[in-house]
Image (cartoon, helix red, strand yellow):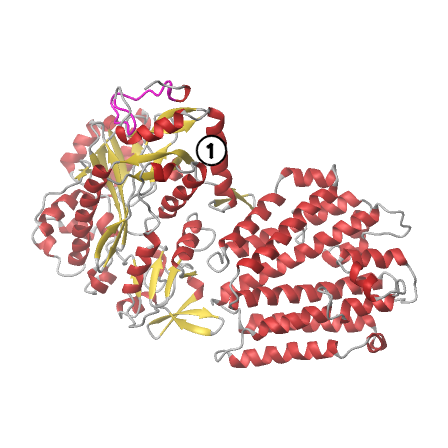
Amino acid sequence: MQTSELLKNYLVDPRTWDEMYTSSTVRQQYEGMVNFLQQMSTEELSKKEELAKRLFMSQGITFTVYSSGEGIEKIFPFDIIPRIITAAEWSYIEEGIKQRLKALNLFLKDVYNSQFILKDGIVPSEMIYSCPHFLREMHGFPVPHDIYVHIAGIDLIRDQDGTFYILEDNLRTPSGVSYMLENREITKRIFPDLIPKNNVRTVTEYPDILHRNLVSLSPRQTSHPTIVLLTPGIYNSAYFEHTTLARLMGVELVEGRDLVVDNHRVFMKTTAGLQPVDVIYRRVDDNFLDPLVFQPDSMLGVAGLMSAYRKGNVAIVNAVGNGVADDKAIYTYVPAMIRYYLNEEPILKNVPTYQLGHPEEREYVFTNMNKMVVKKTNESGGYGMLMGHTASEEEILRYQEEILKDPRQYIAQPIISLSSAPCYMNGRLKPRRVDLRPYALCGPDGIQIVPGGLTRVALREGSLVVNSSQGGGSKDTWVLAG
Amino acid sequence: MLSRVADSLYWMSRYMERTDGILRMLRINYASSQDDLQDFSWKPVLRIFTYLDEERAAAIAQHSRGVLQYMVTDKENSNSVLNIVTHARENARSVQDHITKELWQCLNDFYHTIREEQVVRGLYTDDPVSILDVLIRQGVLYYGITDITMARGEGYAFLNIGKFIERGVQSADILDIKFSDLQYDLTRMDTTYWKYLLLSISGYELYLKTYRSGFDARNVVEQIILSPDFPRSILYSVSRLQMHFERLKGERNREAYQKIDFMIGKIHSRIRYSTVDSILEQGLHAYLISVKEDLYEVGNTLNQHYFAYT
C-alpha cells in the first residue's frame, strides 16, 4: 500500500501498541478506513472536521464555562477518525467485564450484609472501614434483585504488547455514554456510507436497554411506573448528557427541588399536584443525595430520600454506597474477589498496584518514583495525581510529604504506556494515546454491554492523560461484526 | 408535567413572543426613520420595550444605530433581544426532554446567531434591515417548528398561554404608548404615523382591506383591540388564551382551573362586548391599563397554582 500525504510521518513509538499500525503494515481492521481516507484530500477532511464542530455546537452538545458573569459554550474536543475494535477483541473484553461486574456486585452485597469476604480475610477489614465511600446507611438493606451496579463504565487500557488491562471500575455515576451515542451520530453525518460498508455494530440500543432495566426495578406493581432522571441542574458539566438520556428514554428529567418526600414516599411536583415516583436514575453523588443523612447543606438532593429508599418505596440507580467497590485501594482486591466469589481466574488483568498504606510497598514506590503514577484513592477525573516520569525532583518531594500525612489515601501504579490511535491533526494523521470505556448495563436478566463505548484520547503529543478535565478529547468507537 | 417545566415553557414562549415583537417594531421604525418624517421619534419604542428613564431614552433616541444596538445586542439592557433570547434558550435547555429536538436546536441556533460578531457590526455599519431580517427569520422558524413538531399536550398549552398573554400585553402597550404620544387626541389625521404603526405589527394590509376611507384613529383602535381576525389584536390574543387554557381542564387541580377560567372568561367578555365608543367613553388609557392588569393577574395566578415548586 502506498502512503499518501496523510499518512506520511505517522511515527509510532516502538514501545507503544498502535491500534492502526504494526511496525510495517496497517492492521486488517483499519484497512477499509485507511483506503477511504487516502482517497480524501486534506481540504475535504478539514471540512469534515469543521462540520463536526458545527454539528456539536448547533445541537447544543456543549458545556458552559462561566467567566465574568457570562456563559461561554464549549464543545468537548472530538477527533473525526474512529477507533476500531475487532470482533475477537470485543468478545474478550465483553467476557472480562461481565465476569468482573458479577464479582463486584456480589462483593457489594456481601460487604453491606454478611461480610464473608472480610471474615475469610480475603479483603482486610481496615481497607473497608477506612474507605470514606463505605456507608453504614446501606448496611443490612436488601436492594431490588441484589443489583447494586446497574450501570458501569469500566476503563480499559492496552500496554505495549496489546494486552488489555482494567484501569478503573466506575460504579457510581459513570458519565460519557451520551458521547458514545452522539459521536456515532456525528460520524454518520461526516462520513456517509462508511459505517455500513465497514460492518460496524450499532450502539443505539443503549437507552432502550437501560429503560427496560429501570422499569423492572419499580417497587410498585404497575405497567407504567414513573421513572425520573435526577440531575444537579443546568450548571453541571454533564447536563447535556442528562437531557439526552432523559429524552431518549422518555423519562422525566428532574432536579432535587422538583421532588419531595412525604411519609417515606417520593413525589414530584407537577401542574396537577404531587405524583408518586418509583425509580430514580440519579446523576447526583451519594454525598449530596439526602441532606438529612449526608452533607447537610446540599441543595441538590431531596430531604428524606434515604428513608424512602430503605423502606423499599423507591429504587435508586446506581445503588447508594457503591464507592466502596470502585475505590482505588479496593481495586487491588478485585482479582481476589473474582476467585473468591466465582471460583474463576480473572479474564481481564489489573494494572499492578501498590498500596502506599503498606510500608514495604511504599518504600518500593518511593525509590522508583520516576516510573510510577501516584493517585489519590478518592479522587477521579485525573485530579490529584502525579506522573513520576515528568514530575520534577521538587514536585516529587512535595508529593511524598503529602503522602506521608495519610498513606491510605494513595496508590501507585507503574506507568503503562497506553496504546495509540490515529488522530487527524492539521492535515496529517498522528498517533495519540487512547483508553476505552465500554458501558455495561446490569438488569434482572443479566449483564448487557452495548458493542462500543467511549474512546478518550490524550490530544497533546506524548501525553498519557485522557481525562476531559486535563485536555482530553474523544472518538467514535467502532466494534466490527464478525 | 413538572411545575418547573411548565414554568420554563411558559417563560420561554413569552420571551420568544417578545423577541418577535421587538424585532418587527425595530425593522419598521428604522424604515420610518429613513423617511421624510418631521416628527419621527424612537422614544415610543424605547418606552414600550425598555426600562430607560426619560433622560437616557432621550439621549439614545437621537441615533437610530444606537437604538438598534441598545435594543438588539446590548448586554446591559435586560430587555435586549440578546438577553431575551439567552433567557429563552436557558429555559429551553432545562426542559429539553419536553420540547422536540428540532425546537431546541432552533433556539440554540438563534442564540449562537445573535452572538455573532457580524450582527453587532452589521447593525452599526451595514444595512441593519438585513440583520434584523435574519433574526426575524430565526424567530419565524421557532414558530413554525413549534407548530409542526410539538405534541398537542399540556406543554403545548403552556407555550400558547405564555405566547398570547405576552402578545395581548404587547398590543395594549403599543397602542397605549403610541396614543399617549399624541396626548390621546384621536382627531389628528396623520396618515404616515398610523401607517407605520400598523406596519410594525403587520396589520397594514388588513387595515386597507377593512377600512376604505383612509386613516382614522378610531379604526386603528378598533382593529388593534377588537378585530377577531387580526392575529395581534387583543381580542384575538385573549380568545386564543382561553382556547389553550381549556386544554388544562382535568379532574386534578379543579379549583385552580375554575378560578383562572373565570378570570380569562371575564376579560374575554369585556373585550368582546366593547365598542370603540364604549372604550373611548371610559378613556382609552384607562381601558388599556385595566386589560393589561387583568392579563398580568392571570399570569400571577397561574404562577401560584400551576408553577409553584420552590
Q: Chain of mark 1?
A: A
* Residue at numbered disc 1: A49
Q: Is residue A112 in view from this perspective?
A: yes
Residue A461 at x, y = what percent? 37, 26
Residue A296 at x, y = what percent? 37, 61
- For the stretch drawn in magenta, the main secondary structure is loop
Which residues make up the magenta segment? Answer: A7-22
Residue A17 lies in the magenta-colored region: yes
Residue A271 at x, y = what percent? 49, 71
Q: Nearer the viewer, residue A193 or A291?
A: A193
Label 1 environment density (alpha carbons within 10 Å; few <14, some 14–19, many ≥20)? some
Q: Nearer the viewer, residue B135 or A108?
A: B135
Q: Nearer the viewer, residue A231 or A279?
A: A279
The three-letter code of the residue at mark 1 reads Glu
Instruction: Judge from the rendering whether residue A374 lies leftward or rightward of residue A475; answer left or right.
Output: left
Q: Quadrant of the N terminus of chain A?
A: top left
Kindly indicate the quadrant of the structure image that contains residue B117.
Answer: top right
Kindly indicate the quadrant of the structure image that contains residue B125.
Answer: top right
Residue A404 at x, y = what percent? 24, 38
Q: Nearer the viewer, residue A68 or B273?
A: B273
Please tell me whether residue A109 is drawn above or below residue A83 in the rendered image: below
Residue B122 lies in the magenta-colored region: no
Please tell me whether residue A151 is drawn above or below residue A457 in the rendered image: below
Q: Is residue B310 in view from this perspective?
A: no
Kindly indicate the quadrant of the structure image that contains residue A302.
Answer: bottom left
Q: Secondary structure at mark 1?
A: helix
* Residue pictured at 22% horizontal, 53% vertical: A447
